[in-house]
Amino acid sequence: HEGDANRTDLMTITRFVLNEQSKYAESRGDFTILISHIVLGCKFVCSSVNKAGLAKILGLAGDTNVQGEEQKKLDVISNEVFVKALISSGRTCLLVSEENEDAIIVPPAQRGKYIVVFDPLDGSSNIDCGDTNNVSIEDALQPGSSLIAAGYCMYGSSCTFVLSTGNGVNGFTLDPSLGEFILTHPNIKIPKKGKIYSVNEGNAKNWDEPTTKYVESCKFPQDGSSPKSLRYIGSMVADIHRTLLYGGIFMYPADKKNPNGKLRVLYEVFPMSYLMEQAGGQAFTGKQRALDLVPEKIHDRSPIFLGSYDEIEQMKELYAESK
Ligand code: AHM
Ligand code: MG
């Protein structure tokens, strides 16, 4: 019997993805190569986040670095790292990043079959693209149900990469001494019911009726259950990570000022909705299953409710009643 401390059979993220992909007869390792380039970007951001304190102190000497260049913000550098890693993987044809107004069409010589939509400091996911000869921005405007994988990386006291390739959800933690993400959270399933709700209550004045009623029921339950706890970090990745592991509901609803809410369909709503469904939860826009949305523009937004199966069921009922 081997204890954790002596574990020698390391399930790295690359090994895990390679295993999963080998189930597909047509697999040629392209997806594994793509993921390992994304993972490189995550390691870079992780190490930059951890050095950020020191960088700030060094920054006091002036806002320019040793080469005399102006220091770039972390989100800008992260974006550059991901874009360069994705293009050089030779496995992508089209990239949509939160940081870039326009989609990036990969030069033909470096083109592969995957479309990647991502927020360099908020999440990432992939859509299979097919014909790579005539790639256009419209190819990214597919429903979330055509995603073949989605994931996010959370940078904190430890660095966690949560990934689904359509066969459940798995979490990997970076072992800094190895520089490898190791499987630490196999087969994540979200609890069917939750005790936590997560929303920016500062917008309550402008909410619609179903959202207002739901949050009221969290605080003053009429069915004899205990009130729910409120947790809101204001960073979608962190709020979703907690929701996946402990259950509950995360919402960014429509309000009178923002009829489409705030979060972006392609690289915020879709990947998190995909992970939720893969973990046994649900994702709902107030009108429909979130993954059935078809964005019209690459930076479109949508209201979103996601989390434990039962919580989203209740939310759906409230919207049905209000029609
Ligand atoms: P941004 O990427 O445009 O900064 O916004 C996305 C973030 C999410 O991570 C988070 O869930 C949400 O904005 C919080 O918004 P608010 O401050 O309005 O509650
Ligand atoms: Mg963002």
Image (tube, grey):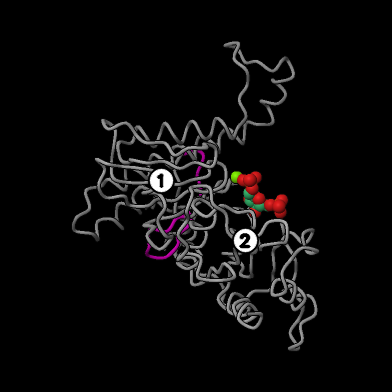
Position in image of residue 249 (x %, y %): 64, 68
Image: 109 above or below 208: above
Q: How many marks?
A: 2
Please state which of the two labelled residues, at mark 1 or mark 2, is closer to the viewer: 1
| Region in magenta | 163-178
Disc 2 marks which amino acid?
Arg
The reply to whether the magenta stretch includes residue 199 is no
Find disc 2 in the rendering and name its residue. 242
In the displayed orientation, state which residue is furthest to the left.
Answer: 25
User: Residue at point 45% right, 42% down?
Assistant: 96
User: Residue at point 60% right, 11% down?
Assistant: 68
Residue neighbourhood size for the residue with mark 2, other residues' Cα within 10 Å, grouped as few (<14), some (14–19), many (≥20): some
Instruction: Left or right? Give the position of 4 relative to 127.
Output: right
Question: Which numbered marker is on residue 27?
Answer: none
What is the quadrant of the N terminus in the image? bottom left
Secondary element under disc 1, as helix, strand or loop, is strand
Q: Is mark 2 within 8 Å of ligand 1?
A: no
User: Residue at point 32% right, 31% down?
Assistant: 107
Position in image of residue 239 (x %, y %): 64, 57
Pointers 1 and 2 in contact (C-beta within 8 Å):
no
Position in image of residue 187 (x %, y %): 45, 65
Image: 37 above or below 312: above
Image: 236 above or below 103: below
Find disc 1 in the rendering and name its residue. 116
Secondary element under disc 2, as helix, strand or loop, is helix
Disc 1 marks which amino acid?
Val
Position in image of residue 69 (x %, y %): 59, 14
Residue neighbourhood size for the residue with mark 1, other residues' Cα within 10 Å, grouped as few (<14), some (14–19), many (≥20): many
